[in-house]
Amino acid sequence: MAAVVCLNRVQHFEGALKHGSPSQASHDDYTQRLTALKERQRLIQERGVQIDPTGRVFDAADYAGRFGSAE
């Protein structure tokens, strides 16, 4: 689940930077956080590959079909 949370945060900060930050301090902070999150995402993926012998790293897309609309 850590990979999904990290992916969501990366997307949040990328979106915030794309649409503009309220101040330069916020922009700098978001850029630093995004850099740290991308590094964490890389580490999570590397560890996932080491743990899973098939080399498959699961992410949000893997779970999308499982939690679709309940009928």
Image (cartoon, helix red, strand yellow):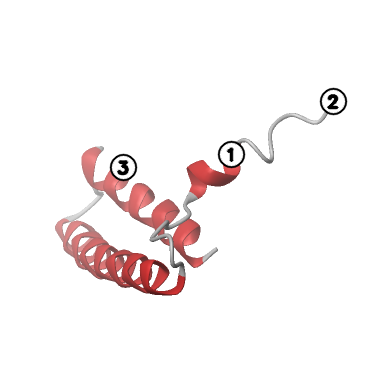
Number of the front mark, 2 or 3 = 2
1 and 3 marks in contact (CB < 8 Å): no
Q: Which residue is mark 3?
A: 15
- Secondary structure at badge 3 equals helix
Amino acid residing under circle 2: Glu
SS at mark 1 in the image: helix
Asked if the residue at tag 1 contacts the one at tag 2, i.e. Cβ–Cβ closer than 8 Å, the answer is no
Q: Position of residue 8 (x, y in %)?
A: 44, 52
Q: Which residue appears farthest toward the front when viewing the image?
A: 53
Query: Residue 38 falls in which quadrant of the image?
Result: bottom left
Residue at (41%, 68%) from the top-left corner?
48
Residues under labels 1 and 3: Cα distance? Answer: 21 Å
The residue that mark 1 highlights is 64
Between the residue at mark 2 and the residue at mark 1, the CA separation in whole angstroms equals 15 Å
Front residue (pair 57, 41) = 57
Instruction: Give the residue displayed 33% in from the left and 64% down from the top.
Output: 41
Taking 35 as reference, is 57 left or right? right
Please report the residue visible at 20 percent of the width from the left and 54 percent of the height from the top.
Answer: 23
Amino acid type assigned to the residue bearing label 3 in the image: Gly
Q: Give 52 or 57, whichever is nearer the viewer.
A: 52
**Nearer the N terminus, badge 2 or badge 3?**
3
> Dot 3 surroundings within 10 Å: few (below 14), some, or many (20 or more)?
few
Residue 71 has which mark?
A: 2
Instruction: Give the x, y percent position of residue 7.
Output: 40, 54
Q: Position of residue 63 (x, y in %)?
A: 59, 45
Tag 2 and tag 3, C-beta contact below 8 Å: no
Image quarter in which the N terminus is found: bottom right
Left or right: where does residue 36 sit relative to residue 68? left
- Marked residue nearer the N-terminal end (2 or 1): 1
User: Residue flagged by tag 1: what amino acid is it?
Assistant: Ala
